[in-house]
Amino acid sequence: MCPGNSGSGDVMGVFANVTQKGRRVVRLAMVCAVMMPAVVAQADTLADALTGAYNHSGLLDQNRALLRAADEDVASAAAALQPVLTWTATARRRYAKSRSSSALFGTTVNRGYNNQVIVRLNASLLLYDGGASAARINAARETVLAARAGLIGFEQLVLLRAVNAYMNLRQAGEIVALRQNNLRLLTQELRAARDRFEVGEITRTDVALAEARLAQARSGLATAEGQRLQAIEEYRNVVGKKPGRLAAPARVPKIDTNLDRAKGVAVRQHPAMLEVQHQVAAAEFDIQASEGAMSPTLTLEGTLGATNNLGTVTTNSDASVGVTAQGTIYQGGRLSSAVRRSMATRDAARAGLHITRHNIQQDVGNALADVSIASASLEASVRQIRAARVAFRGVREEATLGARTTLDVLDAEQELLDAEAARITAQTSQYIAAYTVLASLGQLTAKNLKLPVQEYDAEAYYNLVKDGVAVKSKQGQKLDRVLRALQKD
């Protein structure tokens, strides 16, 4: 194991009094110093954790698939304005029976049959429907945009959870190390208390106090180790792999601490806000579609057919073309009810927009407050550690002179332990709060963080399917390759 760093005075003393064994120790320290940067470089960073979470997330895969389903709704809606071609083929045997009567021959019954094959080709094109189909297409497009914004929201959830998993695991590891060091120190204190008891300097009560505090330290260490195991499982679940050694984050992300400016940014670009805005727009188009359904429709229709009587050389063909107008006179109020329902849905979406706006503003305020709290707590804990360390050393020295009791020493040590634990917690809270601010602004994305990942291209799939894709076309073959790649991933 490589030795820790020493002060410059200690290093000069070592080199002034080296022995042959000391030279070997120095060489080992130099080798460790050379190797240490390589070890640090291999440690998992926060960026590694964020990248792993982005690539591993099943939540993102799930919502990408739901987005592709919404893309297909656009193609389905657009198909209503495209020509519709259908064909039918019928093979049948026709039976005929006739009866005739005469005074000369009496009643005569004639029976016969013939086989027919009938083929027909039908075409239709919607010319007018009061704008209902166009409104449905626009509503589907707005739904797609809402789903894209929702996908960004899920991306933020995944990345923020990765930040929490990484920082909480680092905190758990540091707390375990702190508890282990505290346990070693209390073990030494107990040994010293027993020695002092043997020579009559302290009572059995002092020894019992040291034993009780040592047992408490063991319990605290067991709890810390259990929390660390839980943090490892959370990290493995989020990032997709077992954690290695975690490097300290380079710096806290730079954020704008101006509350009003931050709220303005969040309202403009937060994905939850964009999602609800598109939902409101989709609801408006749904109203137009429901109103358009009350209008008459005008359809161009054409038919081409051929009938062949098998066993003969006769083939009959026919063709027709026409325009059909159709409208609803009375349907029990269903169409009017659909319009009112669409209006109610639009009103609900508008109310949701109001709620989302204020929730986002509150989240920004809460996140910035958490940043201020964490920063103040970290600064205070550093000062507390400095003072508690001086106090602990003084109390321990005074105890050796009989001016302090064993309980005073144990209490001073506990205060130092609490201060160091508070510093670790405050550091973790500061990083989590800063990334929470980014999430509240809608900026916690792989693109903004410049993560080395292959980002999902929502436009690519939409452009492939928005106009409808024939299975055997070149575009259909390209779409098949895209789908196979998605299923493979």
Image (cartoon, rainbow, N blue to C red):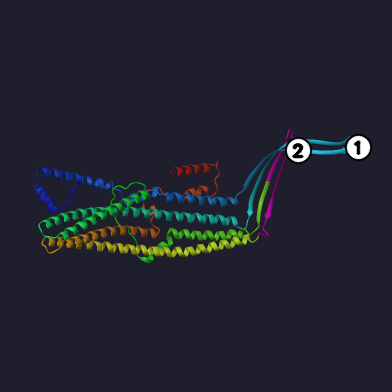
Which quarter of the figure has residue 171?
A: bottom left
Q: Quadrant of the N terminus?
A: top left
Which residue carries the number 2 mark? 95
Q: Position of residue 267 (x, y in %)?
A: 43, 63
Which residue carries the number 1 mark? 103
Q: Measuring 57% from the left and 52% from the top, which residue is drawn there?
A: 77
Going from N to C along the chain, the mark reached first, 1 or 2, is 2
Q: Position of residue 28 (x, y in %)?
A: 17, 44
Of 388 and 3, which appears nearest the observer? 388
Q: Is residue 249 visible?
A: no
Q: Measuring 14% from the left and 43% from the top, which residue is drawn there?
A: 24
Of 408 and 473, which appears nearest the observer? 408
Majority SS type along the magenta span = strand
Q: Is residue 172 visible?
A: yes
Q: Measuring 66% from the left and 51% from the top, which residue is drawn there?
A: 300
Of 115 and 482, which appears nearest the observer? 115
Q: Quadrant of the C terminus?
A: top left
Extreme-right residue of the structure:
103
Q: Is residue 305 above or below residue 391?
A: above
The numbered dot on residue 419 is: none
Q: Amino acid at mark 1?
A: Ala
Q: Is residue 347 left or right of residue 302?
A: left
Q: Position of residue 317 (x, y in %)?
A: 72, 41
Q: Is residue 103 above or below residue 433?
A: above
In the image, residue 347 lies in the stretch drawn in magenta: no
Q: Which residues are magenta?
A: 303-331
Of 53 and 254, which appears nearest the observer? 53
Q: Is residue 150 left or right of residue 312?
A: left
Callout 1–callout 2 Cβ contact below 8 Å? no
Q: Amino acid at mark 2?
A: Tyr
Q: Measuring 24% from the left and 53% from the top, which residue is drawn there?
A: 177
